[in-house]
Amino acid sequence: MIKTNQKNDIDENGNSLITRAGQIMALIIGLGLVSMISSMLVAESLSGDAEKINRSGQLRMLAVKVSRAALLDEKVNPHTSQYLLTAKEDFEKAFRQLFVGGLTHQLDEPAISSQYQKVAKIWDKIKSISFTPAIDEFDGFVVEIDQLVLLIQQESESKISVLRAIHGISLLTIILIAFVVLRRINRNIVSPLKRLVTVAYAAGKGDFSLRADYDQKNELGVLSKTINKMSKELKLTHEDFEKRVRMKTSALSRSNNILAVLFDSSKLLAEQDIKEAIAQITSELQETLGFGEVVVEFTTSEVENVIFDTATGSRVKHNICFEQQKFLISKRSKKYGCLIWNYQAEFRVEDWQINLLKTISDMLASAYTHELERVAENRLVIIEERAVIARELHDSLAQSLSYLKIQVALLTKKMNKELSREQIDSTVEDIHLGLNRAYLQLRELLTTFRLKLEDPSLKNALAGTVIEFSSKSSHEIKLNFDLKNKSLSANQEIHILQIVREALSNVRRHAEATFAKVCIGFEQGHFILTIEDNGIGMKKEHQLEGHFGLGIMRERAKSLNAKINIKSSIDKGTIIEVTFPE
């Protein structure tokens, strides 16, 4: 927040705009008052002047009247003429009331007073009873009265000239003051305000380089300093925000790069051989980290406390100018090696780099663990398949070979005893039949062991199997496939196909059925496989002993984490139901 000490920044004695405005207003008001008062005084001094001029003009008429009355009454006794007396009384009255009224007395003026006294003397002489003026004297009297009227008129006109001068001076003074005030307003208010507006507009557009250059101890000066300080602080704030934005952008870009590296690493570890994937992962890591070299070393030691204090790879730098960061590659208490980061000591290591390397080391540990588990699983699958082959050979071909071995031994005895040709031919015929049976069993085993899903659709593979066994058997086999858009893994599909083939093979060889059906569907989160026939059924002891390939089917069901249920009764057929989760 910007704080300004106005008492120190504003000179209240003369520079304050409010003080100046008050002074200008006081000057204008004072000038107006002086002009108005002067005008009023001059106007008031003119009060009655018109009447005086009128009265002085009336004196001329009355003087003419007196002269005419005197001339008309010369033949009459002028001292007793009523008309002349009346004319003299009227003139006397008008002459005495000439300067009565008005705020100012014009007799104070020397010229008017002197002329008035001169007219008064002439009038006193004319109105004397013992004097009868001549025409020339009356004319001179009228001339003197005209001179008095002229002086009175000139006095009034001088007052009007004074009033005119007051108005003119006031007008000129006001114009001069207005000119000076407008110039000072333009210099001290308008121009600084325009500059302040320009600075504020530029600041609003993000340009904080402009400054208000008005430096006076008044309100605009305070405002200019305040806006300059505000612009400076806004510039610092804007630069700080830009710095933060750059940092956030850099952090987001770095996070994006880290996610890309993690995604690519996960994809490489999932799709490629782990050693090939590690080469690409370390290359991307070095590019993302920005400096240093990344090396992955695996150990074959099973010692619990593996020591990684020294690196033995040819690419590892051994120099006092280099630093190392080592991250153990381990999972479930098993140690597989370490991830080593070599870099120059002058570089500064950040937390995100450490976290990235730790995550990659964990991913490598998980990938290595999965690789070992996959190898172990493959071994188990191979062992399981070998066990299946061994059981198949034992239950079929081995028994046939044992039978043939017995028949060959019997033939040898008969030949040693030199028995009849018919007995020997009978044994040879049995051996021939046994060989044919063993050959057929061997072909079936080879077909089973070479089985694979060339068609990506399980439905088509099952349909092909049903057609194959229908052609080998003398009865009809139907297929009902309804998985409701559910999909099975490749491992599940191959086991299901093997179970169906084994069951149909048993039906063909042992059931003596006239009809069979294969159904596969999905209900309540489980896959259900059913093989049904209407043959002679199986005895209870045969089910328990695992004859007719039941042991093989149970092993495959176990691989599917499935439950197998066999329902069979004599002369009513057999139902084999396999249920396993999604």
Image: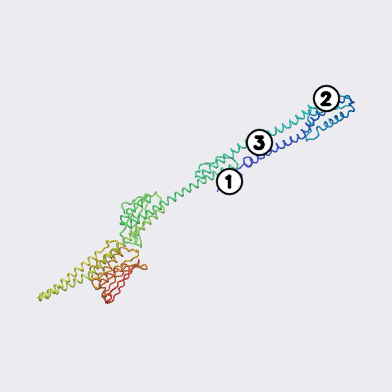
Q: Is residue 349 left or right of residue 508?
A: right
Q: Is residue 536 above or below residue 491?
A: below
Crowd rating for badge 3 (residues with CA inside 10 Å; few <14, some 14–19, many 20+): some
Of 43 and 447, nearer the camera is 43
Residue 574 placement (x, y as % from top left): 28, 73
Q: Which is more foreground, mark 2 or mark 3?
A: 2
Of 448 and 358, nearer the camera is 448
Look at the numbered discs 2 and 3 and tell me whether their residues touch, using CB distance below 8 Å.
no
Of 164 and 469, nearer the camera is 469
Residue 4 numbered tag:
1
* First of labels 2, 3 by sequence position: 2
Q: Separation of disc 1 and disc 3 at Cα?
A: 37 Å
Question: Which residue was labeled with disc 2?
Answer: 138
Q: Which is more foreground, mark 2 or mark 1?
A: 2
Residue 90 placement (x, y as % from top left): 84, 31
Residue 412 placement (x, y as % from top left): 12, 73
Q: Secondary structure at mark 3?
A: helix
Q: Which amino acid is tagged 1?
A: Thr
